[in-house]
Amino acid sequence: MRIVLVDQKGVEQALEAAEGWRVMEIIREHGFEVGGLCGGACACATCHVEVHAEWAGKLHPANDDEEAMLDEVPVLSPTSRLSCQIIYTEDLNGLAVKLVANG
Amino acid sequence: MTQETISTDVVIIGAGPCGLFAVFELGLLDMKCHLIDILDRSGGQCAELYPEKPIYDIPGLPVVSGQELTDRLMEQAAPFKPEFHYNEMVEELEKLPDGRWRVKTDGGLVFEAKVVVIAAGGGSFQPKKPPIPGIEAYEGKSVFYAVKRMETFRGKNILISGGGDSALDWTINLQPVAASMQLIHRRDGFRAAPDSVKKMHALVDEKKMQFHLGQITALHGDNGQLEGVTVKGNDGNDFQLECDTLLPFFGLTMKLGPIANWGLNLHENLIPVDTEKFQTNVPGIFAIGDINTYPGKLKLILSGFHEAALMAQAAFRHANPDAKLTFQYTTSSTSLQKKLGVA
Ligand SMILES: Cc1cc2nc3c(=O)[nH]c(=O)nc-3n(C[C@H](O)[C@H](O)[C@H](O)COP(=O)(O)OP(=O)(O)OC[C@H]3O[C@@H](n4cnc5c(N)ncnc54)[C@H](O)[C@@H]3O)c2cc1C
Ligand code: FES
């Protein structure tokens, strides 16, 4: 099971993913700079990623807490999400996300 | 203006939970502390990132919120009369000929201390800067991330960006002194207190300010003087707004900051210490809490408390090489209880 990550330089790579992990944790575990200051408590917005358009609709929509924290991301795209709020499951095999600068 | 130098036993850099508990442990050993934090209050991450969230792993407190823990630690430290210097970032740390340390802040405060304790957590809290191309050229001239003096903004055409409490509070507070006020936010929902949102909408209804939906994508101006911004509206179309001052409020993040310039060994932005004294590679400078690293380190508050206790013993010995230190319990020592003001 994998996720596909496009890093800040635009390089694409497949990362081994584990069920039940937050996407933020998966990215961090592979040594990429994803922020994650608050450890996934939806309290810092530093784990912001852009989800590939193809996948955006397949994720559960952001809840109120996540929407509120997304307010702290200065430049948002329509598919912006907080990667700590996406828990990896089998259904997400191949999930594609892009890392962006986060202030 | 030259400031008077503040002389003390210990300067603690960072008033997070670990810095606060260090006041207690050092206080029991009669060491007086001054704490410096760039935030406007104590509590560090607990107060800034999760004041209302519960913590379940503080020994003896089955559940306590970030703010409650901060309040309790303040209460526990109070008998030792720590002095707090908020809204100050420690910028310089240098050794004096007599072996003490001189600590300087960005606001011009100068301290001289026998011991320095770095309890800087994940670094200093600093405003998030929007990655809008060329914004650096405007910073400090017409783009500001904080309001230090309201007068600076009198008669300005202000644009505020964001949807949290800072954005809404400053919109409401600066509106009366501004020549014009506009607020821009990505959605018609706000993190800010509902009461502030109501006040903002009322100002819009009274035509005293404007509210726009969208995100700033470009800045226009000359020589650091802003003249306007391009906004991508929520319908995908661009539009322009005129303004001479922009205040982006997107919350805070932690950056290591000036600590990197103090000649201390660093490992991946953390300060290596020994686990007997929690001393850095420089004698007399100690590091506790999230900022330090050693084999087996866990970034937990309770680990920071333990580190504070051991560090205090070593700090006392550093400051008073000839004094005798006896081990005492707060439960049974009248001398400790006198210091705590309970005996
Ligand atoms: C959402 C969340 C949940 C958490 N839950 C738990 C939990 O359940 N249990 C647990 O044990 N831990 C938890 N933690 C971790 C815990 O909050 C940290 O371990 C703790 O805050 C570290 O304390 P500290 O005093 O070392 O540093 P911090 O709390 O980071 O405080 C450091 C302070 O130093 C200031 N500072 C830094 N550099 C400078 C400078 N140069 N000049 C001036 N000021 C400076 C900063 O502004 C900051 O206020 C959690 C953290 C988060 C974010
Ligand atoms: S890690 Fe802080 S919001 Fe996701």
Image (cartoon, grey):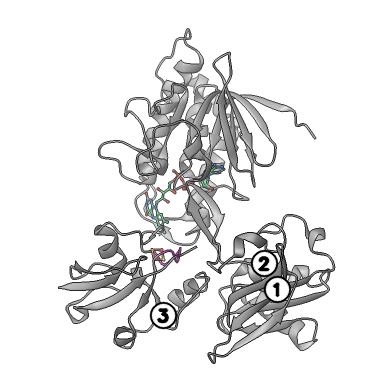
| Magenta segment | A41-46
Q: Is residue B323 above or below residue B102?
A: above
Element type where label 1 sits in the image? strand
Residue assigned mark 1: B159
Give a yes or no on whether discs 2 and 3 share a subunit: no
Residue assigned mark 3: A63
Element type where label 3 sits in the image? loop
Q: Residue placed at 39% from the left, 18% from the top?
A: B327
**Is residue B218 highlighted in magenta?**
no
**Is residue A42 highlighted in magenta?**
yes
Give a yes or no on whether discs 1 and 2 share a subunit: yes
Where is residue A94? Give x, y as percent. Answer: 20, 78
The label number, if any, that marks residue B247 in the structure image: 2
Between marks 1 and 3, how big is the CA–CA gap?
A: 29 Å
Element type where label 2 sits in the image? strand
Q: Is residue B178 left or right of residue A81?
A: right
Q: Residue placed at 50% from the left, 36% from the top?
A: B261
Where is residue A73? Give x, y as percent. Answer: 49, 70
Q: Are marks 2 and 3 in contact (CB under 8 Å)?
A: no
Tag 3: amino acid: Asn
